[in-house]
Image (cartoon, helix red, strand yellow):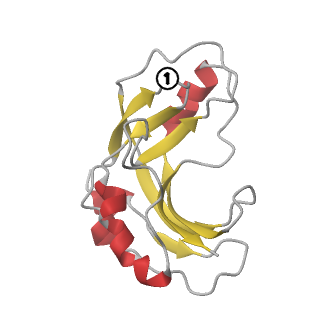
Amino acid sequence: MHLSKIFALAINASPLAFGAIPQIPESAIAQYPCWGTLRENADGFVYLDIDDNYIHELIHFIEDEGYQEPPYFGQTELVGAHISVAYAKEERVSKIAEEGRVIHFTPIECKIVQTPNREGIEGVYIIEVDAPELDLIRAKYGLPKFEFGYHITIGIKSL
């Protein structure tokens, strides 16, 4: 299947007014793999480990707008570029047995969202993704549908 047929990138504003959303070209996003490896860290955070260049390279398209790389790099316990699957605080029936499994996803759209629990942050630039297999894994471990939707955080803009 060709990526151009499955990739429908749309630039949309969040419900909060941020003005024009800086664009990351579809061709730039399409050069990175649409898969990652399922991981669980020692704290119980479950994530899809993806190519760090999603952040390292794509941030250049939005940094003139004030976005900076998220703080996911530099220390061994940090996970780098990822798609969150289950947070450590979520109670589940057991540790995941699928660790190491390769999971595919489809980039859907770029968005700017505001996270009410992060003071000092004006907006977070994300690429929303579709990953039905992650919903199945969450359900298997007694977790509801993921509250925030699956996404890759590309940049954070401070106030």
Q: Position of residue 110 (x, y in %)?
A: 50, 67
- How many numbered marks, from 0 up? 1
Q: Position of residue 84 (x, y in %)?
A: 53, 41
Q: Which residue is most to the bottom?
A: 19
Image height of 12 relative to 94, above or below: below
Image height of 45 relative to 10, above or below: above
Image height of 99 relative to 15, above or below: above
Query: What residue is drawn where x is 61% and y is 19%?
Result: 141
Q: Residues within 10 Å of mark 1 (few under 14, many from 20)?
A: few
Q: Which one is in front, 80 or 18? A: 80
On the picture, is 102 further left or further right than 143? left
Q: Which one is in front, 74 or 97? A: 74
Whether residue 25 can be seen here: no
Secondary structure of the residue carrying tag 1 is loop
Q: Quadrant of the C terminus?
A: bottom right
Circle 1 sits on which residue? 42
Q: Which one is in front, 19 or 103? A: 19
Query: What residue is drawn where x is 69% and y is 58%?
Result: 118
On the picture, is 47 further left or further right than 36? right
Query: What residue is drawn where x is 47% and y is 54%?
Result: 71
Q: Position of residue 16 (x, y in %)?
A: 73, 75
Give the residue type that dot 1 points to: Ala
Query: What residue is drawn where x is 61% and y is 34%?
Result: 87
Whether residue 108 can be seen here: yes
Picture quarter containing residue 114?
A: bottom right
Q: Position of residue 126 (x, y in %)?
A: 51, 62
